[in-house]
Amino acid sequence: QGMAAGNHVLSPGESVGKGLTPEAAKDLGLPEGIAVAASLIDAHAGGLGVIGADVKGHNLPCENQPITSRVAMICGTSSCHMGVSETPIFVPGVWGPYFSAMVPGFWLNEGGQSATGKLIEHVVRGHVAFPELQSKAAARAQSIYTYLNSHLDLIKKSLPVGFLTVDLHVWPDFHGNRSPLTDLTLKGMVVGLTLSRGLDELALIYLATIQAIALGTRHILETMQAAGHHLNTLFLCGGLSKNPLFVQMHADITGKPVVLSKEVESVLVGAAILGACASGDFASIQEAMAKMGKIGRVVQPNHEHKRFYDKKYEVFLKLVEHQREYRAIMKGF
């Protein structure tokens, strides 16, 4: 409690002290003196594990571009959006800039959404048709989300699946807004409810919620770009990156290709990168990132759907504008 903080500051991935102490080595069952790396916050380690991967041969706009053209998204219960820049950029409603907080020598900006995976789960599990969904998914030995995705393919007929929500709109701030509005008093909104209560309706509100999260990502990226970032490729990892609908909607709604990390748990890859630098296996974090961060699938946006999603985005921004108007009307009660 009363101890002074150390005054010798190390960068992430630098070797700490004389390595593992005898006591720690004994407790962990590891050799004494093994290299110990200066660590990172979990989300930043995840960014490190995915953002520096070698993308040659995938025809991506970020190939042969500086790392500053990439944004790393860690999507789980909540989501983080991380971009780096060579000079400090101040983005309204986005944390940072923090020097060398993720990639050494670069300034980090970090946006976020307070409830993403948590919101999808909340909407799906709270729906009256959830028990039916559960039993049907179990009968097919599928996850509920795989089942919902194939159910959407069934009901879309000849339309692109995303167009099913032409009159169903969600504002996703059920747990307030972290970025880019930093307003924890904002609430969620749904426009377009009916008396129907079957599996079709559950699938539609699930789709509209995923789209709302992707529209929120677009809102964050546009704010970062307006402040001076130049971002052209999304790098996704974390639990939600396993959901192909979530991934495709992020590509279509932002208009940018999405690169999936080969290892979903890229936080662990980031930690391993730090260790591999501390042990001297790599000369720099940049070298370790390019060699150790591997990319899996690349998902391209459907550019022919752009007009639809531009209109969805226009509605999205109107929703929050209206919510603020309602609050102003009710002020004083």
Image: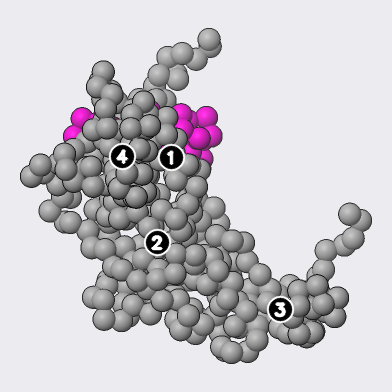
Q: Quadrant of the N terminus?
A: bottom right
x and y percent of residue 288 in the render?
51, 82
Q: Which mark is residue 36?
A: 3
Q: Residues within 10 Å of mark 4 (few under 14, many from 20)?
A: some
Tell me, yes or no, if residue 314 can be seen here: no
Mark nearest the camera among 4 and 2 is 4
Q: Is residue 162 magenta?
A: no
Mark nearest the camera among 1 and 2 is 1
On screen, residue 304 versus residue 283, left or right, reads: left
Give whichever of discs 3 and 2 has the lower sequence position: 3
Q: CA distance from mark 3 to mark 4?
A: 49 Å
Q: CA distance from mark 1 to mark 2?
A: 19 Å
Q: Residues within 10 Å of mark 2 (few under 14, many from 20)?
A: many
Give whichever of discs 3 and 4 has the lower sequence position: 3
Give whichever of discs 1 and 3 has the lower sequence position: 3
Mark nearest the camera among 1 and 3 is 1
Above-or-below relation of 111 to 24: above
Q: Residues within 10 Å of mark 3 (few under 14, many from 20)?
A: many
Segment colored magenta: 166-189
Tell me the residue at 26%/27% (across/down). Answer: 198
> Residue flagged by tag 3: what amino acid is it?
Val
Q: Main secondary structure of the magenta part?
A: loop
Q: CA distance from mark 1 to mark 3?
A: 38 Å
Question: Which residue lies under the disc numbered 4?
Answer: 136
Mark nearest the camera among 3 and 4 is 4
Tell me the residue at 56%/88% (across/down). Answer: 282
x and y percent of residue 128 in the render?
36, 26
Question: Which residue lies under the disc numbered 2?
Answer: 236
x and y percent of residue 67 in the render?
41, 73
- Name the secondary structure under disc 1: helix
178 vs 251, nearest the viewer: 251
Contact between marks 3 and 4 (CB within 8 A): the answer is no
